[in-house]
Image (tube, rainbow, N blue to C red):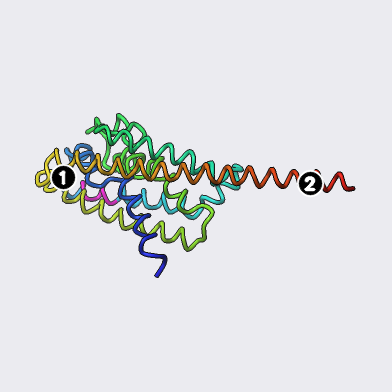
Amino acid sequence: MLTQPAEFGSILLAFIAIMNPIANTPIFLALTEDLDAATRRNVAIRALLLAFALISAFAFGGQLLFNAFGLTLPALRIAGGILVALVGYHLLQGEPSVIHTPASAKAGNPAESALGIAVTPLALPILAGPGTIATAMNLSVGNSKRQALVVVIAFAVVCLLTLICFLSGQALVKYLGRTAIKVVTRLMGLILAVVGVQMLIEGIGGAVDAYHAHHLAMVFIEKAVLRI
């Protein structure tokens, strides 16, 4: 067992909520409507592979990035929590978030090459956007490499689910209907809002603990100096 089932399930649910495979399927179909089935499949696979590579890099290399820029885990949790909660709020309102789905992704551009569509806007920022990156780093940074591996495995599972949704997109949209997809989107928005608030609470708690620890250290140093 890599981790407790409940912990893995929580990570998996967070990625499912932020990526929202079902709600992203109509976007994928709109972006690839002028492509044949084989090209559409290649675009989906390339986009998901790129998204997986990006999230894996941030999961395993997030600590190096933090050290390089002098960042802290509480700061990431606060910023990431706000970002994820905003995405959830917009989805709860029944509208796509500008953080998660930019205008270019909604409109689509038939003139783009298949490779271009796979890179942007599919891989970035729809699949591996700021919210997804913040979630992956928040779950990985400060923990062991084993935890980062669990995060990557959970994201791989979500990528596989997303690929299935993309490849069966036309049948899925026809079967569920637009109304059901909107309901799923709002449900994912609620889950994302909760995940974001939880990140924010943990970030504020970590910042307060760090402040207290720093304050106590300064008091100890002052007393030591006065004794000398």
- Residue 149 in the figure: left or right of residue 227: left
Residue at the spot of label 2: 221
Q: CA distance from mark 1 to mark 2?
A: 70 Å
Tell me the element at label 1: loop
- Residue 212 in the figure: left or right of residue 160: right
Q: Decide which of 21, 95 is in the foreground and name it.
A: 95
Amino acid at circle 2: Ile
Q: Decide which of 142, 228 is in the foreground and name it.
A: 228
* For residue 144, above or below residue 120: below
Q: Residue furthest left?
A: 175
Q: Which residues are magenta?
A: 40-45
* Whole-percent x, y for residue 9 in the image: 34, 58
Q: Earlier in the sequence, mark 1 or mark 2?
A: 1
Amino acid at circle 1: Asp
Q: Decide which of 188, 36 is in the foreground and name it.
A: 188
* For residue 52, above or below residue 110: below
* Whole-percent x, y for residue 213 in the image: 66, 47
